[in-house]
């Protein structure tokens, strides 16, 4: 958004990330089947139960 690209936008971005984290389970459920095989936490990703950025 414009506010994210403006001076101090990092604060707006961090707030948006915090809001995403609150609904992590719902987002994972919406991504479909097979995520538990991909989101293992063994490589670059967090495990399926952990929200990180």
Image (cartoon, rainbow, N blue to C red):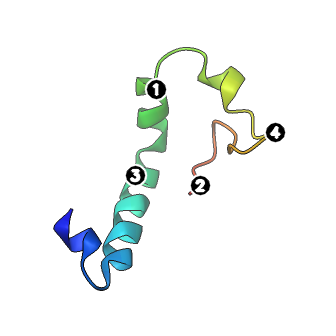
Q: Which circle's residue, 2 or 4, is located before the other in the chain?
A: 4
Q: Residue drawn at (70%, 40%), measured in percent from left and top?
A: 47
Q: Which circle's residue, 3 or 4, is located before the other in the chain?
A: 3
Quadrant of the drawing holding the C terminus:
bottom right
Mark 3 nearby-residue class (10 Å; few <14, some 14–19, many ≥20) = some
Secondary structure at badge 2 equals: loop
Q: CA distance from mark 3 to mark 4?
A: 22 Å
Query: According to the image, label 2 marks what residue?
Result: 52
State whether residue 37 is above or below residue 16.
Answer: above
The dot on residue 14 is none
State whether residue 12 is above or below residue 36.
Answer: below
Q: Residue drawn at (63%, 40%), measured in percent from left and top?
A: 49
Secondary structure at badge 4 equals: loop
Query: According to the image, label 1 marks what residue?
Result: 29
The dot on residue 20 is 3
Query: According to the image, label 4 marks what residue?
Result: 42
Q: Which circle's residue, 4 or 1, is located before the other in the chain?
A: 1
Quadrant of the drawing holding the N terminus:
bottom left
For residue 18, which quarter of the picture?
Answer: bottom left
Residue 20: image location, x then y, percent? 40, 52
């Amino acid at each position: 958004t414009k506010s994210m690209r403006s001076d101090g936008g990092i604060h707006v971005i961090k707030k948006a990330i915090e809001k995403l984290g609150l609904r992590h389970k719902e987002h994972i459920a919406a991504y479909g089947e097979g995520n538990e095989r991909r989101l293992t936490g063994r490589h670059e990703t967090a495990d399926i139960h952990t929200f990180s950025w």
